[in-house]
Amino acid sequence: MIMIDKINFFFSRNGFTRGKILKKKKYLKFCGDNVFFQPRKIPSDAKLVSLGNNVVIASQVVFINHDVMHHVFNNIEKHSTSYHMGKIEIGDNVFIGANTILFPNIKISDNVIIAAGSHVYKDINQSGVYAGIPLKKIKEFEKVFEVRKKEHSMNKDLSREEIIKQIWKS
């Protein structure tokens, strides 16, 4: 990737635009449709990342696809270890909250919400809402979806400013 591409990606107007760039330029192993990618930098080992359809990645999410521990080990015993890498696979209908860290060699199944600030260091094999360090399932995906649909039906005719006023009244 050339520097001008990195600069264009960084200054792209919004996450939908960055998602389209990831797909068009084929930076990732796979990038599905309707991807919203809020981070302003492309993962360092982007070909080790796969994003399904309808995926939202919030601000400051970190994709860790490798470590450099081999430098420590090789100073103990010369040429004893090498660069360690792993893939990150994200399914369909997934939201990953701000400041989440995704560690190497994980797979996140479909219909998953990961709360902000979480650390994902093992596979998530079931639909649901997950949070914390260590990561725990805290709710069902469908329940959050139903709550948000109800909220939308109550607020769909209100402006953003009117919704903010309502929040402060309660």
Image (cartoon, grey):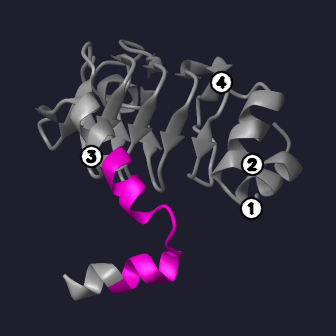
Q: Magenta segment: does it hold 125?
A: no
Mark 1 Cα-neighbour bin, 10 Å: few <14, some 14–19, many ≥20:
few
Cα separation, mark 4 vs mark 1, equals 19 Å
Percent across and percent down for residue 83 are 46, 20
The numbered disc on residue 160 is none
For marks 4 and 3, give the one nearer the viewer. 3
Specify the segment rendered in magenta: 149-165
Instruction: Give the dominant element type of the magenta stretch: helix, strand or loop.
Output: helix
Q: Secondary structure at mark 2?
A: helix
Mark 1, residue position: 13
Cα separation, mark 4 vs mark 3, equals 29 Å
Percent across and percent down for residue 57 are 49, 43
Type of the residue with mark 1: Arg
Cα separation, mark 2 vs mark 4, equals 13 Å
Mark 2 Cα-neighbour bin, 10 Å: few <14, some 14–19, many ≥20:
some
Mark 1–mark 2 CB contact (< 8 Å) = yes
For marks 1 and 3, give the one nearer the viewer. 3
Percent across and percent down for residue 74 are 36, 23
Mark 4, residue position: 31
Q: What is the quadrant of residue 84 in the picture?
A: top left
Mark 2, residue position: 17
The residue located at (29%, 39%) in the rendering is: 146
Q: Secondary structure at mark 3?
A: helix
Type of the residue with mark 2: Thr
Type of the residue with mark 3: Val
Mark 2–mark 4 CB contact (< 8 Å) = no
The reply to whether residue 64 is in sight is no
Identify the mark nearer the N-term, 2 or 4: 2
